[in-house]
Amino acid sequence: MPDELEDLEPFCRMSAAGKALLAQGTRRQRLSGAAVVLHKGQPVSGAYVALEGRLRVFTIAPNGTEATLYFVGPGETCVLAINCLFNDLLYPAWVEADAPTAIALIPGAVYRRLFESEPVIQDLTVSTLSTLVYRLMGELEQVHASNHRQRLAQFILLHATADGSLRMTQQQLARHLGTTREVVARQIGEFVAAGLVTSQRGLIGIRDLFGLRRVVSPDPVSTRRRK
């Protein structure tokens, strides 16, 4: 495995005793894309740390529509799992591998002992909780203040690679945004017609970066000029 847990921040800064404790019972696992890691209502046995790839944490509405809550990237841990671990709760959502992913599962008893003795693990836990609050507040703001068109544009801007490519199907986009494939297809068609993006099967390319940004938020300079 290219990225071992002990080589990642903040685990590499633990004491020798902490590293020895971490090695006790920590399991590594490789997951294929869309492999389910946790189900809603499942007991949490430990802390999940992404080593490579990405985990997707999501909810499912009564009508079956999915909506992404947040992602867990390399070196990050799932805060909902940490919360369940410390408060003896069942997991409140679902987790799946968003792509081929490698994870480490630190047993609950080991993580609690590390939290008690290792300042870097205390910092990681607090930072993870703070990050989750920030991300969820951002998602709530997007849901309440934006329409589907703006949320799709924002998602493309946030998750496209440096060359402006987003390798994701329309169905996957719909699952992340909590809508239907038909809605996403119609909006992408509008973006293509406006010259904002290009679209192929499973691939979206940003064609007009600033135009796509204006979908999310109007250009303040242009707005002032119109006034």
Image (cartoon, helix red, strand yellow):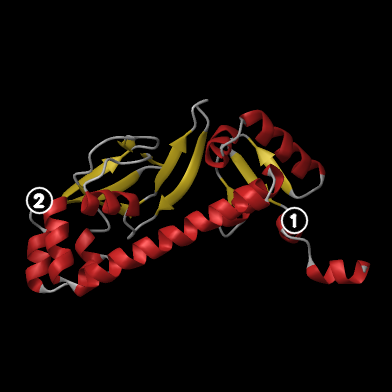
| Residue 119 seen anywhere in this rendered image of the structure | yes
Residue found at x 15% / y 59%: 112
Quadrant assignment, res 44: top left
- The spot of residue 55 in percent (x, y) is 38, 46
Residue found at x 65% / y 37%: 200
Quadrant assignment, res 31: top left
- The spot of residue 196 in percent (x, y) is 75, 50
Frontmost residue, 102 versus 38: 38
123 w.r.t. 206: above or below: below
| Residue 159 seen anywhere in this rendered image of the structure | no
Q: Neighbour class for label 1 at 10 Å: few (<14), some, many (≥20)?
A: some
The reply, left or right, for residue 13 in relation to residue 191 is left
Q: Which mark is residue 51?
A: none
Residue found at x 26% / y 36%: 42
Residue named by callout 1: 208
Residue named by callout 2: 25
- The spot of residue 181 in percent (x, y) is 62, 30
Mark whose residue sits in front, 2 or 1: 2
Q: Amino acid at mark 1?
A: Asp
Q: Earlier in the sequence, mark 2 or mark 1?
A: 2
The reply, left or right, for residue 122 in relation to residue 156 is left
